[in-house]
Amino acid sequence: MADPNKSPAVRSYNADKARRRSADRDNLEQGLEDTFPASDPVSATQSSVASTIDGNAANDRDDAPLVDEALRSTGELGGIEHGGGVRALRRDAVRLSDRASEVASGAVAVGKAEAKSVLQSVEDIVKERPLAAVAIVAAVAWFWGATR
């Protein structure tokens, strides 16, 4: 029962607080039940293998020889059994490797040329305005030293 010495505001606050706790508990319980459905019955499953009319399992049939025969008749199989396809793949891999190394060496050459160009630009600016360059370096050094 409510305490008659408490004001109506306090009683209302306490009642609201109790309702919230109850709602929170209910939400927690519902969340746990939704997350852990322990009351769900366990279903017994049985795996089976599809079979054909004659009773043999469908997985026992091997259609690959038919596919190989069809590819051989069109010439698309091309002698993979004899290593022709493997040789072609190796040639392609070597060609791809050569092209990749050419691209990499070209990228290195471009990077070096760009670095030389930037360095040359900086040198030209320093030669044109040596006092400004010294002032910039001093400002950068002071700022760097002040932040360390």
Image: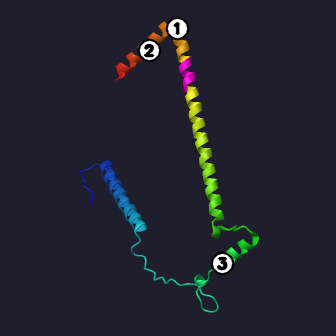
Q: Name the residue that disc number 3 marks.
A: 65
Q: Name the residue that disc number 2 marks.
A: 137
Of residue 76 and residue 123, the one placed in the foreground of this image is 76
Q: Amino acid at mark 2?
A: Val
Of residue 13 and residue 55, the one placed in the foreground of this image is 55
Rendered image: mark on residue 129: 1
- 13 is higher (above) or lower (below) than 72: above
Determine the image quadrant of residue 50: bottom right
Give the mark nearest the N terminus, 3 or 2.
Answer: 3
Q: Which residues are magenta?
A: 115-120
- 7 is higher (above) or lower (below) than 108: below
Disc 1 to disc 2, C-alpha distance:
12 Å
Q: Position of residue 62 (x, y in %)?
A: 62, 80
Q: Position of residue 83 (x, y in %)?
A: 63, 66
Position of residue 46 in the picture relative to residue 5 (left or right): right
What SS does tag 2 mark? helix
Is 111 contained in the magenta span?
A: no
